[in-house]
Structures are given as structure tokens and as C-alpha cells.
Amino acid sequence: MTGWSRGCSGGRRSAVLISAALAVWSAGAQGAEPLCEQARQLAEAVYASTAPRLYAPQVLPEPFAGRWQLGALQADISAGAPLHHGGVFVRESDAQGRDHYVTQADSQGRQLVVEQQPRGWQGDVYSARWRSPAAPDALLLEDSWRPPLVFTSDQGLWLVTLGEPYQVLAPWRVFSANSARPACVLGFRPPASALPAAVERLTALLDQALGPGLNEGTLQPTARIRLAAAHLLGNLAQRPWALDATAAYNRRATVDAALREWADQAPEHRLLLDKLDAHYAPAEQALADYYQKVFGAPDDDAQEMVAWALDLLYRVWFVFPAAESQPVSVPSSNPWPAHLRPETVVEYLVEDD
């Protein structure tokens, strides 16, 4: 089994217990360290932003915005859409409907090629490779549901692969020019304290109420709800400032009315709804204590945040048809205090031989 040894830490530690840290482990040459430092700064900025998904930063901070050469323009690209591409790329299309984003050849004839291939109703998949006339192609990414982010730097092009939409807080892999081996991997380490058991018990009951979602066809609505809930739980624990007010479809009144109707259909449904009601208040208090302990949130701020966040968590598990007199959820602002952001602690983890 491969082990990891701790190296030096970057940045100072906050007096407040950090909610999450960005762990960096080296997988490349020492010459790639400046590149990894740039990628780490980008990852820290995106982590501290309000972007609900780390794989889809909507606004890139400077100086990265000015150096951005390729990537998705929006978080939801399931319908397929052309990629943003800067001046170093030329977009080409082939007879199979694939788009190829190709850089100009360098002095040795090497190019970066990013391919976008339609997969029907599922959206597009993306592959990336370094192409060289003197060697086999170096594959960086294959059939991913998210395109890479590509930037320019004084050292040439570099790119980041961001994981898949079904991965929660997935690690980033950073590649330098013409190398198929990651220069480094950036991992978002979970907080020292896990979500309270009371919150996990409530979540387990919500998952049980959602049901197994069997035989739902290709669209898999229940699986999609579970994935949305998983992403929300990741932010609930590690990035509460990034909780998305639009994540839930229905108002609470609609959800409560539909669940009461559902509970009347069978005794086991009534028992489960009674358990949900009984576990809600303990989960609220436990989550407030968690935010005070992990993030240093004052009691009043923690209580206000938890009332909003747990309601959002509850509603995200259900999607009910909304009557015209009861429109879908009206988003409200995330009340997390703007000054409470983690000061990311970066540890360099070096692979043991």
C-alpha cells in the first residue's frame, strides 16, 4: 500500500479550527512547484468563493481570468454547449459532430488537443491530450463529463482537471505543458470534526423517505436528487457560505403538505414522518454547535444559519409537482456571515516509495 508522509506546511494556521484544508501532494518534478503554487492559489480562491460546485467556478479571480484559455462558461453543461476558448486555441469540427480545440504547434510540433464529443441527452464528454509528431499522444483526460480549465503562464500552458459532477469536492489534477503525469494533485481535506451524528441521523431518515427509485428509466430522477443532496451535504459540512438557495425545488409548505399526504397512505410512512419531526430540532441544535466549534460562528449567527440551512437540506430531498397557487421555491439569501471564511491550511504530502 502506498503511504504518504507530511512535508512542510504553507501559510499560517488560524486560531479558529479550520473547517477544511487544501492538501497538496507532489506527483511530479521539482520544476513544477511554481505551477502548483498557482493552482493552489486558484483552488483556495474557488474554495472560499460562493460557487456551489468546485468543478464549475463561475467567476475566476485575477490574474487567472486574464490567463484563462479554455473551459466551461456555466455550471450546468448537461445540454452541451461550446467551450470558452481564448486566442491560443482554434476550434475545429469533424463529420461525427465532435469539436476539437487545438493549440498552435510549438517549436517541436507539440499541441494540446481538447475534444468535445456529444453523448445524446446525457450531454457531452471531454478528452484532453498532448499531441506530438515524435511520440505517442499523452492522454490527460478521457471521456469526462467536465472539461479541463486551461491557462497560460510564463512557463507555457497548464491545465486542471476538476473531477466529475457525481464526485463531491473531488480533487484537482494539475498538468504542466507536454507532461502526461500530474505535476501535483490538490485535495480538499474534510474538517477535523465530522457532521454531528444528529444531522447524519436526520439525513438517513430523509434518504429513507426519498425511497429507492427503482425502474425509473434513463433520467434517474431519484438518483439525481440523491446527488444534489450529497453536494449540499458537502457544503453544509465544509463550505456553508456556498450553500445554494436555489438547490431546493419546492417551498417548505409544499413539502410538508405532500409528506402529510404521503404519511396517510401507510402506517410505515406515518412512523417515518414522525421520526423526521422528532429528529429535526436535535439536528438543528447539533449543527449550530458544530458551526460554533468548527468555524467560530457566534451563537446568534450560527442559529440563524442553521434555521436556513437545515430547511434547505430538508427540502432538497423532495421534488413535488407544484400547483399554480403554490409556485416553486423562492430563493432566499444565504445568511452565512461574510467575514467567516476558512483560512486554508496547505500541507505538502509527499508520496512514500
Image (cartoon, rainbow, N blue to C red):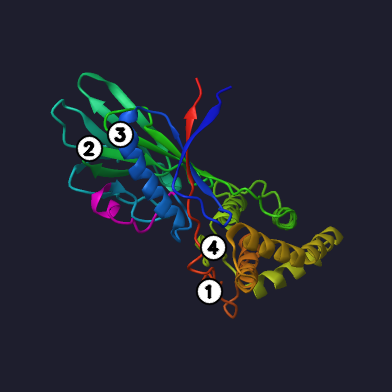
| Residue at numbered disc 3 | 176
Would you say 82 lies left or right of 216 here? left
User: Which is nearer the N-term, disc 1 or disc 4?
Assistant: 4
Residue 78 seen from this side: no
Query: Which residues fall within the magenta stretch?
Result: 55-69
Residue 33 in the image: above or below residue 248: above
> In front here: 310 or 115?
310
| Residue at numbered disc 4 | 247
Q: Residues within 10 Å of mark 3 (few under 14, many from 20)?
A: many
As measured in the structure, the alpha-carbon distance from the residue carrying label 1 to the one carrying label 2 is 43 Å
Q: In terms of secondary structure, where does tag 4 sit?
A: loop
Q: Main secondary structure of the magenta part?
A: loop
As measured in the structure, the alpha-carbon distance from the residue carrying label 2 to the one carrying label 3 is 8 Å
Eye-nearest disc, 1 or 2: 2
- State yes or no: discs 4 and 2 in contact (Cβ < 8 Å): no
Q: In terms of secondary structure, where does tag 1 sit?
A: loop
User: Which is nearer the N-term, disc 4 or disc 3?
Assistant: 3
Per the rendering, the mark at residue 178 is none
> In front here: 337 or 261?
337
Residue 28 in the image: above or below residue 192: above
Q: Amino acid at mark 1?
A: Ser
| Residue at numbered disc 1 | 332
User: Which is nearer the N-term, disc 1 or disc 3?
Assistant: 3
As measured in the structure, the alpha-carbon distance from the residue carrying label 4 to the one carrying label 2 is 38 Å
> In front here: 283 or 332?
283
Would you say 137 lies left or right of 107 here? right
| Residue at numbered disc 2 | 156
